[in-house]
Image (cartoon, helix red, strand yellow):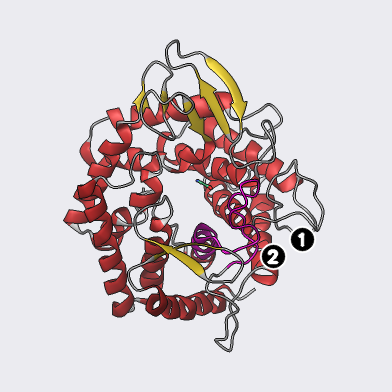
């Protein structure tokens, strides 16, 4: 597979999308192949700025850099207004915008905003339950003691803040949250709960459940993929072999439960049959997570070669079955990856474009072709 040719095609699509989207941020499509645009009201805006920074890093196209910087400035306004930030996805938002700008151009204002974002994420720390609360305000009746597996991808903001400031508090809290996630979200067979509830007054573990999965106790494929990648990143920071082992167990479960064509269905416990929706974004995230995981395994690790082959095969399968781009420039829709699914039981964006699927597809290509690993950690660490 020619990764660079695919990257060039995404670049053409991104240039076309820049003129389409203007100041809007693509979120998901709903049946018509066109992205719905949001403006700092959701958890997904960072994926568009992330695509822009990756595209700039690859192309060095000054026009793209300017769009990336302008988009990133709006994240600073959002932070100043504290608008729609009462949730844990501050990591997704700020690692891929101001965090990316810091990594790419050492912009001091971007660094400062990223640190402010980390401080905001810390306000979600609930010491009795020893968790970062995912959703809703403190004391929320339903969500007050709830974690979700996706949060593992927000924790790198806290690792980064500890490195930048020398203050261990950010990473200490992130580590406790990662350990709670490891203990309560990951099951013995390497599958995972999407969410878990704790009693906020006693800290007791209550039960696992789901939000976007097939049922409580099922393994939602995107959650599993967040876990693969998130625990591999926890290993990169803490060098604790237990995190690497957890990432590997989640990866093995993911790989062993995929259909023949490698594109994950939306939940491993939903019927694995053609009429059921896929979630191509889960496959793209898992590919990036496995590339991160494999990087930490010694050359003689018996699983390393198999994991690398899996990642390459997945990206090739996404290119074959899901990629909208065309070499003649006539792409099929606005997104890179068809067959993403956001919230199947909720009826939102099923078999559609989802912007995070596009981001992780591009990150996987960048990792494979150029060793550019996205913006989850400082380069060279
Ligand atoms: N983090 C939300 C999702 O994956 O849908």
Name the one closer to the observer, 96 or 141: 141
Q: Which residue is mark 1?
A: 261
x and y percentages locating residue 177 in the rendered image: 44, 28
Name the one closer to the observer, 213 or 187: 213
Q: Is residue 45 above or below residue 182?
A: below
Q: Residues within 10 Å of mark 1 (few under 14, many from 20)?
A: few
**Residue 359 magenta-drawn?**
yes
Q: Secondary structure at mark 2?
A: helix
- The image quadrant where one finds the N terminus is bottom right
Residue sitting at the far left: 108
Asked if marks 2 and 1 touch (Cβ < 8 Å), the reply is yes
Q: Is residue 351 left or right of residue 46?
A: right
Q: Which residue is mark 2?
A: 317
Let me know if residue 302 appears in the view: no
x and y percentages locating residue 280 in the rendered image: 63, 58
Let me know if residue 89 appears in the view: yes
Q: Residues within 10 Å of mark 2 (few under 14, many from 20)?
A: some
Q: Is residue 333 left or right of residue 200?
A: right
Bounds of the magenta span?
337-363
* Residue beneath the point at 21% across and 38% down: 165
Q: Secondary structure at mark 1?
A: loop
Q: How many marks?
A: 2
x and y percentages locating residue 207 in the rendered image: 60, 21
Disc 2 CB within 8 Å of nearest ligand 1 atom:
no
* Residue beneath the point at 50% across and 68% down: 35
Q: Main secondary structure of the magenta part?
A: loop
x and y percentages locating residue 88 in the rendered image: 40, 39
């Amino acid at each position: 597979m020619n990764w660079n040719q695919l990257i060039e095609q995404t670049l053409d699509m991104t240039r076309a999308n820049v003129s389409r989207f203007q100041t809007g941020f693509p979120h998901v499509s709903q049946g018509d192949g066109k992205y719905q645009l949001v403006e700092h009201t959701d958890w997904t805006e960072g994926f568009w700025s992330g695509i822009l920074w990756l595209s700039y890093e690859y192309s060095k196209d000054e026009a793209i850099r300017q769009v990336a910087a302008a988009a990133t400035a709006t994240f600073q306004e959002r932070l100043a207004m504290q608008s729609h930030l009462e949730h844990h996805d501050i990591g997704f938002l700020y690692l891929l915008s101001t965090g990316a700008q810091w990594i790419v151009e050492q912009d001091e204002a971007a660094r400062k905003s990223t640190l402010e974002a980390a401080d905001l994420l810390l306000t979600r720390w609930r010491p009795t339950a020893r968790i970062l609360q995912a959703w809703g305000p403190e004391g929320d009746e339903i969500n007050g003691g709830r974690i979700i597996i996706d949060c593992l991808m927000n924790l790198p903001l806290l690792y980064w803040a500890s490195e930048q400031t020398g203050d261990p508090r950010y990473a200490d809290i992130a580590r406790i949250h990662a350990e709670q996630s490891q203990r309560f979200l990951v099951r013995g067979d390497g599958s995972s709960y999407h969410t878990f509830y704790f009693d906020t007054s006693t800290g007791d573990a209550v039960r696992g459940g789901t939000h976007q999965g097939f049922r409580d106790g099922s393994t939602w494929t995107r959650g599993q993929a967040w876990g693969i990648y998130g625990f591999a990143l926890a290993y990169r920071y803490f060098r604790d072999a237990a995190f690497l082992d957890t990432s590997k167990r989640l990866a093995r479960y993911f790989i062993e439960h995929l259909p023949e064509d490698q594109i994950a269905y939306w939940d491993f416990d939903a019927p694995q049959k053609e009429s059921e929706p896929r979630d191509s974004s889960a496959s793209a995230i898992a590919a990036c997570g496995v590339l991160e995981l494999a990087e930490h395994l010694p050359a003689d690790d018996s699983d390393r070669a198999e994991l690398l082959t899996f990642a390459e095969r997945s990206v090739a399968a996404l290119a074959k079955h899901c990629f909208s781009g065309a070499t003649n420039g006539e792409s099929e829709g606005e997104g890179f990856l068809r067959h993403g699914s956001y919230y199947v039981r909720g009826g939102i964006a099923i078999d559609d474009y989802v912007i995070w699927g596009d981001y992780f597809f591009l990150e996987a290509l960048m990792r494979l072709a150029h060793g550019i690993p996205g913006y989850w950690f400082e380069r060279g660490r």
